[in-house]
Amino acid sequence: MNPALNIALNPAWHPRAARLALLAALALLTGCASGPRTGRDGPPARPPAGLEQVPDAVPRVEPLRIGGPNKPYEVLGQRYAPHTSDVPLQENGLASWYGTKFHGQPTSSGEPYDMYGMTAAHKTMPIPSYARVRNPANGREVVVRINDRGPFAAGRVIDLSYTAALKLGVLRGVTPVQVQRLTFDDIRSGRWRSPRDAAAMPAPLTTPVPQPPAVAVAALSGDDLAPGDAATSGYWLQLGAFRTRDAALRLQLRLRDEGDASLAAVAVFEGDGWFRVQAGPYATRAQAQQAADAGLRASGRSALVIERSASLNR
Protein backbone atom coordinates (compact mmCIF):
# COMPACT_ATOMS: atom_id res chain seq x y z
CA MET A 1 0.00 0.00 0.00
CA ASN A 2 2.97 2.32 0.53
CA PRO A 3 5.68 3.42 -1.92
CA ALA A 4 8.26 2.44 0.72
CA LEU A 5 7.64 -1.15 -0.38
CA ASN A 6 9.94 -0.53 -3.33
CA ILE A 7 12.87 0.25 -1.01
CA ALA A 8 12.75 -3.27 0.40
CA LEU A 9 13.52 -4.64 -3.05
CA ASN A 10 16.55 -2.40 -3.67
CA PRO A 11 19.62 -4.65 -4.17
CA ALA A 12 21.93 -1.86 -2.95
CA TRP A 13 20.78 -2.51 0.59
CA HIS A 14 22.84 -4.66 2.95
CA PRO A 15 21.46 -8.25 2.47
CA ARG A 16 20.27 -8.64 6.07
CA ALA A 17 18.64 -5.20 6.13
CA ALA A 18 17.01 -5.91 2.78
CA ARG A 19 15.56 -9.19 4.08
CA LEU A 20 14.14 -7.49 7.14
CA ALA A 21 12.62 -4.70 5.05
CA LEU A 22 11.10 -7.23 2.66
CA LEU A 23 9.54 -9.17 5.54
CA ALA A 24 8.05 -5.93 6.87
CA ALA A 25 6.72 -5.10 3.42
CA LEU A 26 5.15 -8.53 3.07
CA ALA A 27 3.47 -8.16 6.47
CA LEU A 28 2.10 -4.78 5.41
CA LEU A 29 0.64 -6.19 2.21
CA THR A 30 -0.88 -9.20 3.93
CA GLY A 31 -2.56 -7.11 6.61
CA CYS A 32 -3.89 -4.42 4.32
CA ALA A 33 -5.09 -6.45 1.36
CA SER A 34 -6.64 -9.38 3.20
CA GLY A 35 -9.17 -7.49 5.33
CA PRO A 36 -10.36 -8.70 8.72
CA ARG A 37 -9.85 -12.44 8.13
CA THR A 38 -6.06 -12.38 8.56
CA GLY A 39 -6.18 -11.28 12.19
CA ARG A 40 -3.83 -8.41 11.37
CA ASP A 41 -6.50 -5.84 10.67
CA GLY A 42 -10.11 -5.28 11.53
CA PRO A 43 -12.98 -2.91 12.28
CA PRO A 44 -12.92 -0.32 15.06
CA ALA A 45 -14.01 -1.59 18.46
CA ARG A 46 -16.59 1.19 18.80
CA PRO A 47 -17.28 2.80 15.41
CA PRO A 48 -19.03 6.19 15.46
CA ALA A 49 -22.78 6.15 15.01
CA GLY A 50 -24.26 7.15 11.68
CA LEU A 51 -21.42 6.05 9.39
CA GLU A 52 -24.01 4.85 6.88
CA GLN A 53 -24.95 8.51 6.38
CA VAL A 54 -21.41 9.78 5.70
CA PRO A 55 -21.55 11.56 2.33
CA ASP A 56 -19.69 10.08 -0.60
CA ALA A 57 -16.58 11.84 -1.87
CA VAL A 58 -17.60 14.77 -4.08
CA PRO A 59 -15.55 14.62 -7.30
CA ARG A 60 -13.61 17.64 -8.40
CA VAL A 61 -10.97 18.18 -11.04
CA GLU A 62 -7.59 17.83 -9.34
CA PRO A 63 -4.23 18.00 -11.13
CA LEU A 64 -2.68 14.56 -11.62
CA ARG A 65 0.67 14.23 -9.90
CA ILE A 66 3.76 13.59 -11.99
CA GLY A 67 5.98 10.97 -10.43
CA GLY A 68 5.52 10.22 -6.76
CA PRO A 69 2.58 7.81 -6.36
CA ASN A 70 2.12 7.74 -10.16
CA LYS A 71 5.55 6.42 -11.07
CA PRO A 72 6.04 2.71 -11.90
CA TYR A 73 6.63 0.44 -8.91
CA GLU A 74 7.16 -3.22 -8.12
CA VAL A 75 5.57 -5.38 -5.42
CA LEU A 76 6.26 -9.10 -4.90
CA GLY A 77 7.92 -9.39 -8.31
CA GLN A 78 4.98 -7.77 -10.12
CA ARG A 79 5.56 -4.46 -11.87
CA TYR A 80 2.79 -1.87 -12.04
CA ALA A 81 2.66 1.24 -14.23
CA PRO A 82 0.04 3.73 -12.94
CA HIS A 83 -1.73 5.88 -15.48
CA THR A 84 -0.51 9.46 -15.63
CA SER A 85 -3.32 10.95 -17.73
CA ASP A 86 -7.07 11.40 -17.46
CA VAL A 87 -8.10 8.01 -18.82
CA PRO A 88 -11.43 6.18 -18.43
CA LEU A 89 -11.23 2.83 -16.67
CA GLN A 90 -13.83 0.18 -15.84
CA GLU A 91 -13.18 -3.10 -14.01
CA ASN A 92 -15.05 -6.00 -12.51
CA GLY A 93 -13.38 -7.87 -9.68
CA LEU A 94 -13.18 -8.31 -5.93
CA ALA A 95 -13.23 -5.53 -3.35
CA SER A 96 -11.50 -5.76 0.01
CA TRP A 97 -11.12 -3.16 2.76
CA TYR A 98 -8.64 -2.01 5.37
CA GLY A 99 -9.23 -0.62 8.84
CA THR A 100 -7.68 -0.08 12.26
CA LYS A 101 -4.16 -1.35 11.52
CA PHE A 102 -3.62 1.37 8.92
CA HIS A 103 -5.75 4.17 10.37
CA GLY A 104 -3.62 7.33 10.51
CA GLN A 105 -0.76 5.79 8.52
CA PRO A 106 0.49 7.54 5.35
CA THR A 107 -1.14 6.47 2.10
CA SER A 108 0.73 6.38 -1.21
CA SER A 109 -0.34 9.99 -1.79
CA GLY A 110 1.19 11.04 1.54
CA GLU A 111 -2.22 11.75 3.08
CA PRO A 112 -3.06 9.97 6.36
CA TYR A 113 -5.41 7.03 5.89
CA ASP A 114 -8.82 7.70 7.44
CA MET A 115 -10.91 4.55 7.72
CA TYR A 116 -13.95 6.78 8.37
CA GLY A 117 -13.45 8.74 5.14
CA MET A 118 -14.63 7.83 1.63
CA THR A 119 -11.34 6.77 0.06
CA ALA A 120 -9.86 3.69 -1.59
CA ALA A 121 -6.68 2.13 -2.97
CA HIS A 122 -6.16 1.04 -6.58
CA LYS A 123 -3.11 -0.41 -8.29
CA THR A 124 -2.97 1.80 -11.40
CA MET A 125 -5.52 4.64 -11.32
CA PRO A 126 -3.76 8.01 -11.38
CA ILE A 127 -3.57 9.62 -7.94
CA PRO A 128 -5.72 11.48 -7.12
CA SER A 129 -8.78 10.04 -8.89
CA TYR A 130 -12.44 9.54 -8.12
CA ALA A 131 -14.27 6.29 -8.76
CA ARG A 132 -17.78 4.91 -8.55
CA VAL A 133 -17.96 1.46 -6.96
CA ARG A 134 -21.10 -0.67 -7.25
CA ASN A 135 -22.05 -3.82 -5.39
CA PRO A 136 -24.25 -5.70 -7.91
CA ALA A 137 -25.50 -8.08 -5.20
CA ASN A 138 -27.47 -5.32 -3.45
CA GLY A 139 -27.41 -2.42 -5.94
CA ARG A 140 -25.55 -0.09 -3.57
CA GLU A 141 -23.08 2.43 -4.99
CA VAL A 142 -20.49 4.75 -3.48
CA VAL A 143 -18.11 7.38 -4.84
CA VAL A 144 -14.60 7.29 -3.37
CA ARG A 145 -11.38 9.23 -3.79
CA ILE A 146 -8.38 7.12 -4.83
CA ASN A 147 -5.35 8.15 -2.77
CA ASP A 148 -3.52 4.85 -2.14
CA ARG A 149 -2.04 1.81 -3.91
CA GLY A 150 -3.30 -1.78 -3.68
CA PRO A 151 -4.74 -4.33 -3.20
CA PHE A 152 -2.11 -6.81 -4.37
CA ALA A 153 -3.94 -10.12 -3.80
CA ALA A 154 -5.01 -11.93 -6.97
CA GLY A 155 -8.40 -10.98 -8.35
CA ARG A 156 -8.87 -7.90 -6.19
CA VAL A 157 -9.38 -4.58 -7.95
CA ILE A 158 -9.97 -2.09 -5.12
CA ASP A 159 -9.28 -1.74 -1.39
CA LEU A 160 -11.98 0.33 0.31
CA SER A 161 -11.96 2.39 3.47
CA TYR A 162 -13.95 0.92 6.36
CA THR A 163 -16.82 3.37 5.86
CA ALA A 164 -16.97 2.85 2.08
CA ALA A 165 -17.10 -0.92 2.63
CA LEU A 166 -19.81 -0.48 5.27
CA LYS A 167 -21.96 1.60 2.92
CA LEU A 168 -21.51 -0.95 0.12
CA GLY A 169 -22.30 -3.88 2.40
CA VAL A 170 -18.97 -5.66 1.85
CA LEU A 171 -17.54 -5.79 5.38
CA ARG A 172 -17.98 -9.55 5.72
CA GLY A 173 -15.24 -10.36 3.20
CA VAL A 174 -14.05 -9.87 -0.35
CA THR A 175 -17.02 -9.15 -2.61
CA PRO A 176 -17.50 -8.82 -6.39
CA VAL A 177 -17.88 -5.17 -7.42
CA GLN A 178 -17.90 -2.97 -10.50
CA VAL A 179 -15.44 -0.05 -10.54
CA GLN A 180 -15.55 2.98 -12.84
CA ARG A 181 -13.03 5.82 -12.79
CA LEU A 182 -14.69 9.23 -13.18
CA THR A 183 -12.92 11.31 -15.83
CA PHE A 184 -12.53 15.08 -15.76
CA ASP A 185 -15.25 15.33 -18.41
CA ASP A 186 -17.58 13.19 -16.27
CA ILE A 187 -16.98 15.59 -13.38
CA ARG A 188 -17.33 18.84 -15.35
CA SER A 189 -20.48 17.71 -17.14
CA GLY A 190 -22.11 16.20 -14.05
CA ARG A 191 -22.43 12.80 -15.75
CA TRP A 192 -20.80 11.21 -12.70
CA ARG A 193 -23.95 11.71 -10.69
CA SER A 194 -26.51 8.90 -10.56
CA PRO A 195 -30.19 9.60 -9.76
CA ARG A 196 -29.32 8.76 -6.13
CA ASP A 197 -26.57 11.37 -6.13
CA ALA A 198 -28.88 13.99 -7.62
CA ALA A 199 -31.30 13.51 -4.72
CA ALA A 200 -28.73 13.35 -1.92
CA MET A 201 -25.60 15.31 -2.82
CA PRO A 202 -24.63 18.91 -3.55
CA ALA A 203 -23.66 19.97 -7.05
CA PRO A 204 -20.07 19.37 -8.27
CA LEU A 205 -17.48 21.83 -6.94
CA THR A 206 -16.94 23.17 -10.45
CA THR A 207 -20.55 24.43 -10.56
CA PRO A 208 -21.60 27.42 -8.38
CA VAL A 209 -24.70 26.68 -6.30
CA PRO A 210 -27.00 29.59 -5.36
CA GLN A 211 -27.88 29.43 -1.68
CA PRO A 212 -31.54 29.93 -0.65
CA PRO A 213 -32.53 31.71 2.55
CA ALA A 214 -31.49 29.49 5.42
CA VAL A 215 -32.26 28.92 9.08
CA ALA A 216 -29.59 27.53 11.39
CA VAL A 217 -30.84 24.36 13.02
CA ALA A 218 -27.86 23.48 15.23
CA ALA A 219 -24.29 24.49 15.93
CA LEU A 220 -21.40 22.47 17.31
CA SER A 221 -19.67 25.12 19.36
CA GLY A 222 -20.48 28.54 20.70
CA ASP A 223 -23.98 29.98 20.58
CA ASP A 224 -26.50 28.57 18.15
CA LEU A 225 -26.63 30.63 14.99
CA ALA A 226 -29.99 32.30 14.68
CA PRO A 227 -31.62 33.66 11.49
CA GLY A 228 -30.26 37.11 10.77
CA ASP A 229 -27.29 36.67 13.07
CA ALA A 230 -24.35 38.55 11.56
CA ALA A 231 -22.12 35.63 12.52
CA THR A 232 -23.63 33.65 9.65
CA SER A 233 -22.25 36.12 7.08
CA GLY A 234 -19.02 35.28 5.32
CA TYR A 235 -17.58 32.24 3.54
CA TRP A 236 -18.64 28.74 4.51
CA LEU A 237 -17.62 25.19 3.58
CA GLN A 238 -20.53 23.00 2.55
CA LEU A 239 -19.72 19.45 3.67
CA GLY A 240 -22.99 17.75 2.81
CA ALA A 241 -26.65 18.25 1.92
CA PHE A 242 -29.48 15.96 2.99
CA ARG A 243 -33.24 15.67 2.67
CA THR A 244 -33.63 14.72 6.34
CA ARG A 245 -32.61 16.63 9.46
CA ASP A 246 -31.40 13.46 11.24
CA ALA A 247 -28.88 12.64 8.50
CA ALA A 248 -27.46 16.16 8.61
CA LEU A 249 -27.18 16.13 12.40
CA ARG A 250 -25.38 12.79 12.33
CA LEU A 251 -22.72 14.25 10.04
CA GLN A 252 -22.49 17.33 12.25
CA LEU A 253 -21.89 15.18 15.34
CA ARG A 254 -19.28 13.10 13.54
CA LEU A 255 -17.39 16.25 12.55
CA ARG A 256 -17.45 17.39 16.16
CA ASP A 257 -16.10 14.04 17.35
CA GLU A 258 -13.30 14.15 14.77
CA GLY A 259 -12.11 17.50 16.12
CA ASP A 260 -10.78 18.68 12.74
CA ALA A 261 -8.76 21.80 13.56
CA SER A 262 -9.14 23.10 10.00
CA LEU A 263 -12.91 23.52 10.46
CA ALA A 264 -14.58 26.44 12.15
CA ALA A 265 -17.93 25.98 13.95
CA VAL A 266 -20.19 23.56 12.05
CA ALA A 267 -23.90 24.27 11.67
CA VAL A 268 -26.89 22.75 9.91
CA PHE A 269 -28.88 25.17 7.76
CA GLU A 270 -32.38 24.37 6.53
CA GLY A 271 -33.76 25.81 3.32
CA ASP A 272 -35.54 24.85 0.12
CA GLY A 273 -36.21 21.35 1.45
CA TRP A 274 -32.53 20.66 2.18
CA PHE A 275 -30.47 20.40 5.38
CA ARG A 276 -26.98 21.69 4.56
CA VAL A 277 -24.00 20.93 6.83
CA GLN A 278 -21.61 23.89 6.65
CA ALA A 279 -18.49 25.03 8.55
CA GLY A 280 -17.67 28.69 9.06
CA PRO A 281 -17.77 31.51 8.79
CA TYR A 282 -14.38 32.42 7.29
CA ALA A 283 -13.47 36.04 6.65
CA THR A 284 -12.18 35.49 3.11
CA ARG A 285 -12.66 32.98 0.32
CA ALA A 286 -8.93 32.22 0.48
CA GLN A 287 -9.19 31.23 4.15
CA ALA A 288 -12.18 29.01 3.42
CA GLN A 289 -10.40 27.34 0.50
CA GLN A 290 -7.31 26.80 2.65
CA ALA A 291 -9.48 25.04 5.26
CA ALA A 292 -11.12 22.95 2.51
CA ASP A 293 -7.74 21.88 1.16
CA ALA A 294 -6.50 20.99 4.65
CA GLY A 295 -9.57 18.85 5.25
CA LEU A 296 -9.12 17.12 1.90
CA ARG A 297 -5.51 16.25 2.70
CA ALA A 298 -6.44 14.96 6.15
CA SER A 299 -9.55 12.92 5.39
CA GLY A 300 -10.25 12.88 1.67
CA ARG A 301 -13.40 14.91 2.29
CA SER A 302 -14.21 17.55 -0.33
CA ALA A 303 -16.03 20.79 0.50
CA LEU A 304 -17.80 23.44 -1.53
CA VAL A 305 -16.91 27.08 -0.70
CA ILE A 306 -20.02 29.27 -0.63
CA GLU A 307 -20.62 32.89 0.37
CA ARG A 308 -23.43 33.71 2.77
CA SER A 309 -24.50 37.33 3.17
CA ALA A 310 -26.52 38.86 5.99
CA SER A 311 -29.40 39.48 3.60
CA LEU A 312 -29.71 35.74 2.96
CA ASN A 313 -30.09 35.04 6.66
CA ARG A 314 -33.03 37.32 7.31
Image (tube, rainbow, N blue to C red):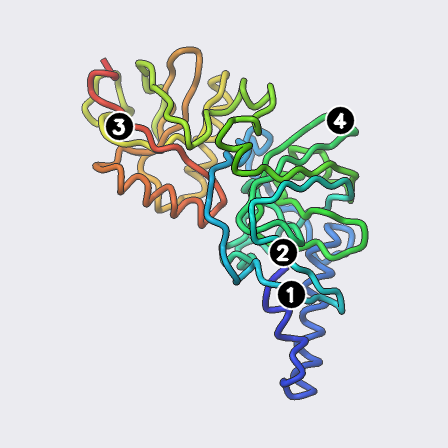
Q: Secondary structure at mark 1?
A: strand
Residues at marks 2 and 1 touching, judged by CB atoms closer than 8 Å: yes
Which of discs 3 and 2 lies nearer the camera? The answer is: 2
Q: CA distance from mark 1 to mark 3?
A: 52 Å
Q: CA distance from mark 2 to mark 4?
A: 30 Å
Left-right relation of 222 to 121: left
Q: Residue beneath label 1, please?
A: 73
Q: Quadrant of residue 171?
A: top right
Q: Earlier in the sequence, mark 4 or mark 1?
A: 1
Give the percent coordinates (x, y) of residue 132.
63, 35
Residues at marks 3 and 2 touching, judged by CB atoms closer than 8 Å: no
Give the percent coordinates (x, y) of residue 128.
53, 48
Q: Secondary structure at mark 2?
A: loop
Q: CA distance from mark 3 to mark 2?
A: 49 Å
Q: Residue beneath label 4, please?
A: 138
Q: Secondary structure at mark 3?
A: loop
Give the percent coordinates (x, y) of residue 78.
75, 65
Q: Nearer the viewer, residue 36 or 89?
A: 89
Q: Residue beneath label 2, please?
A: 82
Residue type at tag 3: Asp
Q: Earlier in the sequence, mark 1 or mark 3?
A: 1
| Count of numbered tags | 4
Relative to 193, say whether 290 is above or below. below
Q: Which mark is residue 223?
A: 3
Q: Secondary structure at mark 4?
A: loop
Q: Earlier in the sequence, mark 4 or mark 3?
A: 4
| Label 3 neighbour load within 10 Å: few <14, some 14-19, many 20+ | few
